[in-house]
Amino acid sequence: MKCPQCVYSNPDGVKFCLNCGEKFVKQNTPEDDTSFFYEFAHYVDAVPKFERSVEPKFQNIFSRVFRNHSELEAERLFIVGTALTTPKITEVTDTWPKPWLFARVFIIALLAFAGFYIGVSYFHNINFIPGLIITGAFAVPFTTLIFFWEMNAPQNIAFYRVIYVVLVGGILSMLAALLFFDILRNNINPITIGIAEELAKAITVIIFVRYRKYRYILNGLLIGAAVGAGFAAFETAGYALRSLLSGDGANLYNTIMWRGFFAPGGHVAWAGLTGAAFCRVQGDQPFKLSLLVRFKFWRVFALVVTMHALWDTPITGMFPFGQVFLMAASWVVVFLLIRAGLKEIGERKLSV
């Protein structure tokens, strides 16, 4: 059915255009406005089936980034995860999603940061400094989080819930890390820093995913990334403020830029890996402490702690070359767990 407004080819039977939202209402026929929401929800459930690829190749995964997308396509993404708009497991396709919204979010964040930068650097208005720090601190971690959200094929976590985890999980994990640092205050080194911070994030992630509602590997990856994004952004904001108070304006920008560059392969990815590993061992089981000693969880958590410790090790060449390598290694494991998550969905569908 072609839309008379935008000439978009819609599936047969829809009551509105999936591209521009134009209603297909027959004349002299009463229509219930609420029915459009349920119709919309029905086709949101089908979104995972479209534009997918089986092979996890970069040209497939990122092939939709540079295409034109309507506002309605973004709206489809933002309404998923509710009781009415979560697809059944049998309706979810276990092939690789093709995310694109994260790129738009990154561009918007860059434009906002540029605006604050102009206000501070060219107009010398200190009122722009808080916005500069906040925008700079959240831009890349939040963009990376949107990528994980789009890769969450079950689409069973609402966006407002993700924001809640970013804010609450971010501050809880930071407070937990401070508690561990206080306990280890006489023995602070890269290894103990890695253990303290990753353990703090792991505890926080498990608090959010221990309920069986979030039982998929991809759910754990998303919730973990949300906690990691909050931790990374708040930490970056703190370091940026320290640079500002030291009177070194150039160091303020260097802090934001370098920490933003490495953010995708740091706290966001590490916490995401921990969350995915925990959900992998928990499955449909109720939470038990014994799950934390499973090898499949510990090998990932130990890897995350090791990468964090190496990241902070003050050896020659670690910054930036060693950290670039660690960032790449983190994302190799991320894609492996995404593949495991999609395989899990396929197995769950067969068991239904």
Image (cartoon, grey):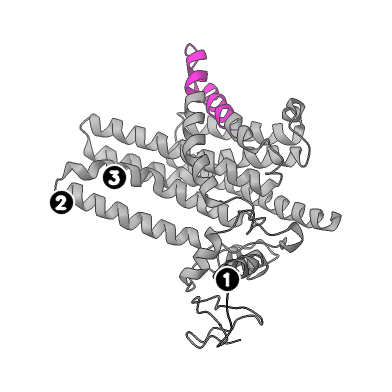
- Residue 100 drawn at (x, y percent): 52, 63
The residue tagged with tag 3: helix, strand or loop? helix
Are the residues tagged 2 and 3 within 8 Å (C-beta)? no
Residue 97 appears left or right of 122: right
* Residue 191 within the magenta-colored segment of the rendering: yes
Q: Give the label on residue 36, or none.
A: 1
Looking at the figure, which quarter contains the N terminus? Answer: bottom right
Task: Give the residue displayed 50% in from the left and 64% down from the top.
Answer: 75
Q: Badge 3 is on which residue?
A: 131
The residue tagged with tag 2: helix, strand or loop? loop
The quadrant holding residue 247 is: top left
Residue 210 appears left or right of 232: right
Q: How far is mark 2 from mark 3, CA to CA?
A: 15 Å
Name the amino acid, label 2.
Tyr
- Which of pointers 1 and 3 lies earlier in the amino acid sequence? 1
Q: Give the crowd class for mark 1: few <14, some 14-19, many >=20 residues within 10 Å.
A: some
Q: Give the crowd class for mark 2: few <14, some 14-19, many >=20 residues within 10 Å.
A: few
Q: Give the label on residue 319, or none.
A: none
- Which of pointers 2 and 3 lies earlier in the amino acid sequence? 2
Are the residues tagged 2 and 1 within 8 Å (C-beta)? no
Name the amino acid, label 3.
Gly
Q: Is residue 232 visible?
A: yes
- Prevalent SS, magenta region: helix
Q: Which residues are magenta?
A: 177-201
Mark 2 or 1, closer to the camera: 1
Task: Give the residue displayed 49% in from the left and 61% down from the top.
Answer: 101
Q: Is residue 129 above or below residue 108?
A: above
